[in-house]
Image: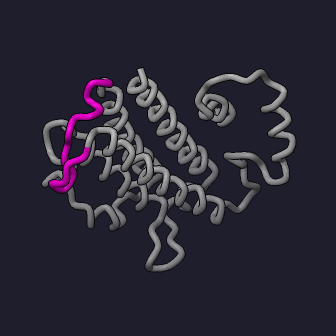
Amino acid sequence: MINKDYLDSVKKQFLYYKTLGEKAMEQLEPEQLFVTVNEDTNSIATIIQHLSGNMLSRWTDFLTSDGEKEWRNRDAEFQVTLTTKEEVLHVWNKGWNCFFNALNAITPQQLQTIIYIRNEGHTVVEAINRQLAHYPYHVGQIVFYTKMLKQTQWNSLSIQKNKSDSYNVHKFIKEKSIKNFTDDELNRLK
């Protein structure tokens, strides 16, 4: 039972972070996806190239082949090759679709299966947790970058500034329940 609950929980959390990234990018003009602040920073488009490359490498045939595929060129993920918002969104969705297809195919019995990433053994749980730290890290970069680049009012993706009290009142007037925090948050972001 706990294994199924774990899988359900991580699926919701990954969907939540995917949605945060999309809602942030929706607030930008297309050309802002390609802005870099200096030579040591990556544009949102570049971050997305990297995320997608990681997802495709890690989750394609992940139970039977190493997560660092021979065909992956990680260094190239940090060179700007995308030129339009449509290309950025295509690459974003290609990576997420690969990842979610793999995640949705995992059975609770497979969570302790050993898989390899760069020849280092991980249980499937460890591999998922590794990405649960990695992907939101980059989504956070996207959100932060978007807030810096946005030239009109920011549409908050979380509790709005100076609205914590009213948010908490709304939460505490409800009956106690057991659910994933993302249930309400994903509805709010629609």
Of residues 145 and 132, the one nearer the viewer is 132
Does the stretch in magenta take in 89?
A: no
Q: Which residue is at 58% across, 63% downward?
A: 145
Q: From this view, report whether residue 53 is shown above or below residue 59.
A: below
Residue 175, picture quadrant: top right
Does the stretch in magenta take in 116?
A: yes
Colour treatment of the image: one colour
Q: Which residue is at 63% across, 24% downward?
A: 178
Q: Is residue 42 left or right of residue 24?
A: left
Tell me where residue 126 appears, x and y as whole percent.
33, 44
Of residues 184 and 188, the one nearer the viewer is 184
Tell me where residue 22 appears, x and y as whole percent.
54, 44
Tell me where residue 48 appears, x and y as whole percent.
41, 54
Residue 50, picture quadrant: bottom left
Q: Is residue 84 left or right of residue 55?
A: right
Tell me where residue 111 appears, x and y as whole percent.
29, 32
Q: Is residue 70 left or right of residue 177?
A: left
Number of disc labels: 0
Quadrant for the C terminus, please.
top right
Q: Which residue is at 48% across, 60% downward?
A: 44
Q: Which residues are magenta?
A: 108-122
Q: Which residue is at 76% across, 55% downward?
A: 153
Q: From this view, report whether residue 15 is shown above or below residue 150.
A: above
Residue 180, picture quadrant: top right
Q: From this view, report whether residue 146 is shown above or below residue 185.
A: below
Quadrant for the N terminus, please.
top left
